Image (spheres, rainbow, N blue to C red):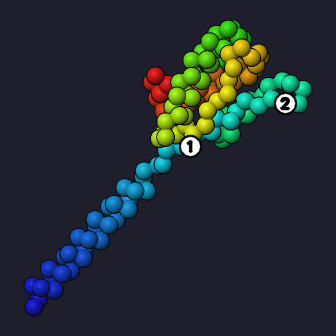
Amino acid sequence: MYLILEEVAMKKVAFLLISLFILGCAQNITPPRSVSSNIIHETDDEQHEIVILDPEFQSWFVTNAKPIGFYSLRFYESHNIRYVTAWNQKARNTYGPITNEINYDPNEDYGMEVNYKLYWYFKYIESIYGRYFFL
């Protein structure tokens, strides 16, 4: 009888340890971040502004972005066209962190500030998901 009780107690302890281990592992798993792409808006005076809702972007931007004149407008536009194309392809997939497409028209003049901030937003996304995220 003593042997049976000891065996039952050992099973309960083993079950408890396995449960705690699984629970501890589950808490370390972070869900994929959902990234909103509704970031380019037209203002009332037909100008464009960029609104990025990710709360971590601003601090990353301040510490990592180069000054606005570091690259030319043409540089920002050409890179943004490639980034937006890759972004929208990922958004069309039913899986992954990107859920919305970016409406970026290469023929539209968004100006230096919007293109600058959009470029650095893509760099921020690369810093989170890896350098090859947009390939």
The quadrant of the rendering that contains the N terminus is bottom left
In the foreground, 85 or 117: 85
Residue 47 seen in the figure = yes
**Residue at the spot of label 1:** 34
Regarding mark 1 in the picture, which secondary structure is present there?
Answer: loop
Q: Is residue 90 above or below residue 26?
A: above
In the foreground, 48 or 6: 48
Using the rendered view, name the quadrant where residue 109 is placed. Answer: top right
Q: Residue at x 53, y 34 (%)?
A: 92
Q: Residue at x 46, y 22 (%)?
A: 135
Q: Residue at x 84, y 30 (%)?
A: 43
Q: Residue at x 15, y 82 (%)?
A: 6
Image position, residue 31 (x, y; %): 48, 48
Identified by mark 1, the residue type is Ser
Image position, residue 9 (x, y; %): 21, 80
Identified by mark 2, the residue type is Thr
Image position, residue 59 (x, y; %): 65, 34
In the foreground, 99 or 1: 99
The number of numbered discs placed on residues in the rendered structure image is: 2
Image position, residue 90 (x, y; %): 51, 31
Using the rendered view, name the quadrant where residue 48 is placed. Answer: top right
In the foreground, 28 or 106: 106
| Relative horizontal placement of residue 97, taking residue 5 as reference (left or right) | right
Is disc 1 in contact with disc 2, using a CB cutoff of under 8 Å? no
Q: Earlier in the sequence, mark 1 or mark 2?
A: 1
Regarding mark 2 in the picture, which secondary structure is present there?
Answer: loop
| Relative horizontal placement of residue 65, taking residue 109 as reference (left or right) | left
Label 2 crowd bin: few (<14), some (14–19), many (20+), radius 10 Å: few
**Residue at the spot of label 2:** 43
